Amino acid sequence: MTPKHPEDRHPMLDQLSQLWRNKTAVAGLIVITLFTLSGIFAPFISPHDPIEVALYDQLKPPAWKEGGSSKNLLGTDDLGRDILSRIVFGARVSLMVAVVSVGIAFFFGTIIGSVCGYYKGNLDNIVMRGIDIILSFPYILLAIVVVAYLGPSLQNAMLAIAITYVPRFARIVRASVLEECEKDYVMAARAIGARDSRIIFTAILPNCMGPLIVQTTLSFASAILDAAALSFLGLGAQPPTPEWGADIARSRAMILRASWVMTFPGLAILGAVLGFNLLGDGLRDALDPRLRD
Amino acid sequence: MPDPFQHTGVLLEARNIFKYYPIRGGVFMKKTGEVKAVDGVSLVIHNGETLGLVGESGCGKTTLGRALLRLEEPTSGEVLFQGENILDYTQHQMQSLRGKMQVIFQDPFSSLNPRKTISHIIGEPLLVHGVKRRKDREARVLELLEVVGLRKEHMRRYPHQFSGGQRQRIGVARALALKPELIVCDEAVSALDVSIQAQVINLLKDLQQDFGLTYLFISHDLSVVEHVSSRVAVMYLGKIVELAPSAALYREPLHPYTQALLSAVPIPDPSVHRPGRIILKGDVPSPIDPPSGCRFHPRCHYARSICSEQAPELTEYGVRHFAACIFAGRLTLEPL
């Protein structure tokens, strides 16, 4: 038997091995996996109950600082709650907010953008002017309006973030679809008698994934931040739910006395955001066959 | 002179095809003008023939080709395919007819979806037309690859891993997948090297013999068109100015524009001396505001005042030799 040609393997394998060779993407993947696992298995890994108040242990410093103990590795906050446990549980809330709200925005934004970009004409004009109107509001203000209308809760905060994120996805998808529509392979798909839905979703959209993936990862990051902002305003996660952003907001008064209370949730956000961005860049390279070889 | 096209029958007939693109401007997108890309074209394509369609860039060749396949909706006119006006077809009817009429594109780099494997690209027409089993599709893809001279191991590769000529072969295989009757070759070899051009042209000719295909061969390259076509139509600014059997057209062109085009064909032999190359003055006028009367008159050597007033109709002068020039047949064109 002749040896198998390396190019004859299934394309998914190629893409995965491409991703694997990209060290920074793998680092991002590891970080995200760690956060995801800690979110899923939070009850088993966290040393304490994240909402248990222990007034005797108020504002304990991390274990390696003077006055710290191995009981609270990253110290405690002003109510004596274990910071490590709150970060582990906070991963749950933050990642869920990111995935759900960005997922909804991705879904509707992609449909709106691709339909507008493909059919153009009056439909496109009307819908895109509507999108422009949404974009002309400061989006956090819009989110506040939505939450104020629906009532403050984490679910409504996710919905509000999703609504404010739809326009950016719609615009990016529309621009890419407009560009791809000019190419002959779209005409070729029409010439073989493919239906419009097939042309949009199986021919054009896969070619628009590059910018979409970048947008998605950036949005994951900012969704985490926006959820925190809404929580800070009392419109998102309600206390005592552990949430990174809300914890930062709560502890800003103590930054001079007990900087660790604010630092560790901040590092958690930094890590998650960085992880998503690194992975996103790697995926973009791996999914585009033209950047290979 | 015997008529070689007498018995073959008509595959496609176009009657008075117009394709105008609106130009919109201002805040309310009001229509401010029209690009008259195709301006009243009628032609007939017979079963099994190759009709060449030539003209300079921007004369409406490609738009006409797409309008005939209804890839662009003509502004008005009729396209009869096997006797039925396909412009009356519903979208659904049109989709099932697509298998009978295919197209090969000019640019082999943008006509293949960069994210699909060759197997997927050639197999997609089959999938769309109801071949649901993957095994059946792959068997047919293998057959097609062999027909166009590619190898089995190419199936899993992506378009960017091929050369221009190979990509054009993939485009040909895709067009053949549904066993079409008419293939519009839209500048199908223009983007290729000369040696590769010859290969692809020979492939197309062999396929025509083997499968009884009919071609509309759009090109700006007159020598290629002469080589492949049984009849040739010459387009200028959205209209056909001359339509004739290939030999007659190249031997004795009746329209001054055809003559000018032919005189511009380079001859790859420095020892041949060509008398009087006709160099056309100026550019092609804008199709937004075409000249009155005969559209060619501002650039024509032989133009008289009547040419700017009266638009000549396509009229038969020799056997199946049509030309749209008031003086056709009466002009003594300079010998080539």
Image: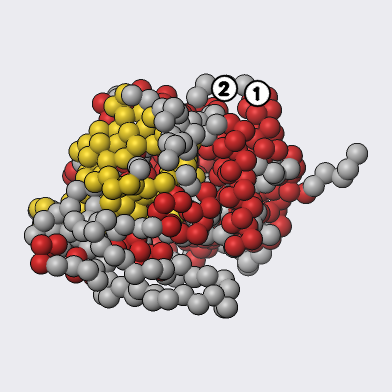
Farthest residue toward the front?
A: B1
Residue at horizontal 41 percent and vertical 51 percent from the top: B248
Q: Distance between the residues labelled 2 and 1?
A: 7 Å
**A176 or B171: nearer the viewer:** B171
Instruction: Give the image location of residue B313, x and y in percent.
Output: 19, 48
Residue at horizontal 29 percent and vertical 27 percent from the top: B85
Q: Which amino acid does label 1 sit on?
A: Asp
Element type at marker 2? loop
The answer to whether marks 2 and 1 mark residues whose Cβ atoms lie closer than 8 Å is yes
Earlier sequence position, callout 2 versus callout 1:
2
Instruction: Give the image location of residue A80, x and y in percent.
Output: 51, 50
Instruction: Give the image location of residue B279, x and y in percent.
Output: 34, 75
Residue at horizontal 10 percent and vertical 67 percent from the top: B305
Q: Residues within 10 Å of mark 2 (few under 14, many from 20)?
A: some
Residue at horizontal 58 percent and vertical 73 percent from the top: B269
Which residue is denoted by mark 2 in the rendering?
B131
Q: What residue type is labelled 2?
A: Val
Task: Check if mark 2 and mark 1 are on a common chain.
Answer: yes
Instruction: Give the image location of residue B77, x and y in percent.
Output: 22, 36
Q: Please, is residue B207 above or below residue B30 in the view?
A: above
The image quarter containing residue A78 is bottom left
**A164 or B19: nearer the viewer:** B19
Left or right: B13, with B213 as reference point: left
**A123 or B176: nearer the viewer:** B176
The image quarter containing residue A120 is top left
Looking at the figure, which quarter contains the N terminus of chain B? Answer: top left
Which residue is denoted by mark 1 in the rendering?
B136
Residue B307 at least partly seen: yes
